Image (tube, rainbow, N blue to C red):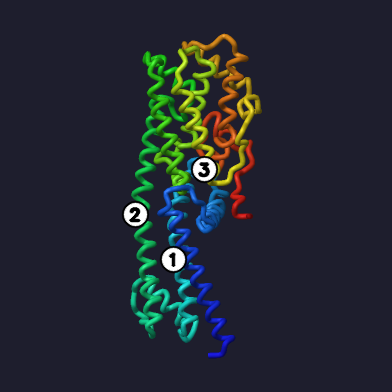
């Protein structure tokens, strides 16, 4: 074999091996690695699927119709991602089979597909081709097994998330609001038990912050009921805690501050995964999307419902802003990213922020 042809075959084999290796690394980061490790291929696939869904969303006239369309986005994206992994592995092995002596590209593609799908209708012709075929069949089986094992873990995390979101409707209505949460706790004489709520949601934020970065598709799995959303529920609980700490005249509770910190850190970690922009060190007096008039209206409603509100409204406003500034931008960005249902102080103003872009794709 001439040296030039030998060098060409070697380069072709290395190219195929690089494609297969990169695909396996992407699958490992997505399915196996227990931490947030963004991979280019899933980002490209989900971005492309989202663009196709936007074509359908352009014809939607109501939120309910948009919700029905977007409910399929994450499942379809996962299936397309799995197909993309198998396709790339098949193409990589096609190049390697061609490099080791298979007569034509069509024959190499046929042998690769037969091996990847373990069909066995095209037998390899040499010992080295047999080794390649066996390795490709093993990789195909591993990818399918990883997807099968991945789904129960994802749906378990989804169930934990949605149990708390649904339970919030009992306390805060639908969509949930801080006024409804606090008014209902006052009516049943349970204001002294708000600490249980903060402890529950601190644990919820820790769980969501972990699962929605290591299992990134979870962010786009929509709630079973169209009016529910993990993003708007998170915003309602954080706003309730911020109002209790700054405005409602109740004995100090350190648990509320721990929950607030757990909440905005979890939202920031998820925003970091999607490369959303926010100020990591905001000042307590930085502007937020809530106006003073809106805050005063909530205070008046709290008074109407019998809640003890602090007399110094200016100090209460400054205290509320000091907490809200930590999660205001990321909350609105995540509401826009997930197309959350209408809810006060979150998705109702998510268009005020620039539509989040996956700038990592451009880089």
Which x, y percent locates residue 161?
40, 38
Q: Residue at x 51, y 19 (%)?
A: 245
Residue 119 falls in which quadrant of the image? bottom left
From the viewer's side, name the closer residue of 236 and 317.
317
Quickly name the residue at label 3. Answer: 338
322 relative position to 122: left or right: right
Mark 1 / mark 2, whichever is N-terminal: 1
- 10 Å crowding of disc 2: few (<14), some (14-19), many (20+): few
Mark 3 / mark 1, whichever is N-terminal: 1
Q: CA distance from mark 1 to mark 2?
A: 17 Å
Task: Name above or below for residue 219 compared with residue 327.
Answer: below
Q: Residue at x 45, y 54 (%)?
A: 30
Which x, y percent locates residue 114?
38, 75
Task: Name above or below for residue 68 compared with residue 250.
Answer: below
Residue 68 visible (yes or no): no
Q: Are marks 3 and 2 in contact (CB under 8 Å)?
A: no
- 10 Å crowding of disc 1: few (<14), some (14-19), many (20+): many
Residue 148 falls in which quadrant of the image? bottom left
Q: Quadrant of the C terminus?
A: bottom right
Q: Residue at x 44, y 34 (%)?
A: 205
Quickly name the residue at label 2. Answer: 149
Which x, y percent locates residue 50?
53, 52
Q: Residue furthest top?
A: 311
The residue mark sitting in front, 3 or 1, is: 1
Quickly name the residue at label 1. Answer: 86
Q: Are marks 3 and 1 in contact (CB under 8 Å)?
A: no
199 relative position to 285: left or right: left
Which x, y percent locates residue 262?
47, 32
Q: CA distance from mark 3 to mark 2?
A: 25 Å
């Amino acid at each position: 074999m001439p040296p030039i042809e030998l060098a060409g075959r070697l380069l072709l084999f290395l190219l195929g091996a690089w494609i297969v290796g990169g695909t396996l690394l992407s699958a490992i980061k997505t399915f196996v690695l227990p931490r947030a490790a963004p991979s280019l291929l899933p980002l490209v696939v989900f971005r492309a699927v989202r663009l196709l869904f936007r074509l359908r969303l352009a014809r939607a006239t109501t939120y309910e119709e948009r919700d029905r369309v977007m409910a399929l986005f994450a499942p379809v994206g996962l299936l397309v991602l799995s197909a993309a992994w198998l396709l790339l592995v098949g193409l990589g092995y096609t190049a390697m089979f061609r490099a080791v002596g298979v007569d034509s590209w069509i024959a190499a593609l046929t042998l690769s597909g037969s091996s990847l799908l373990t069909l066995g209708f095209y037998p390899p012709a040499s010992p080295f081709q047999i080794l390649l075929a066996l390795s490709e069949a093993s990789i195909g089986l591993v990818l399918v097994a990883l997807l099968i094992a991945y789904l129960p873990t994802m749906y378990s995390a989804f169930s934990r998330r949605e149990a708390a979101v649904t339970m919030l409707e009992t306390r805060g209505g639908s969509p949930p609001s801080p006024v409804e949460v606090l008014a209902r706790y006052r009516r049943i004489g349970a204001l002294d038990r708000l600490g249980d709520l903060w402890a529950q949601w601190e644990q919820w934020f820790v769980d969501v912050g972990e699962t929605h970065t290591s299992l990134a598709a979870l962010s786009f799995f929509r709630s079973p009921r169209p009016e529910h959303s993990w993003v708007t529920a998170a915003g309602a609980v954080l706003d309730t805690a911020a109002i209790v700490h700054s405005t409602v005249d109740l004995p100090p509770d350190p648990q509320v501050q721990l929950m607030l910190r757990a909440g905005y850190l979890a939202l920031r970690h998820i925003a970091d995964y999607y490369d959303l922009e926010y100020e990591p060190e905001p000042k307590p007096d930085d502007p937020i999307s809530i106006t003073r008039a809106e805050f005063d209206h909530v205070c008046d409603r709290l008074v109407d419902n019998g809640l003890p509100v602090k007399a110094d409204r200016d100090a209460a406003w400054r205290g509320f802003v000091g907490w809200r500034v930590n999660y205001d931008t990321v909350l609105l960005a995540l509401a826009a990213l997930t197309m959350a249902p209408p809810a006060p102080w979150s998705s109702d103003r998510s268009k005020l922020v620039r539509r989040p872009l996956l700038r990592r794709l451009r880089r």
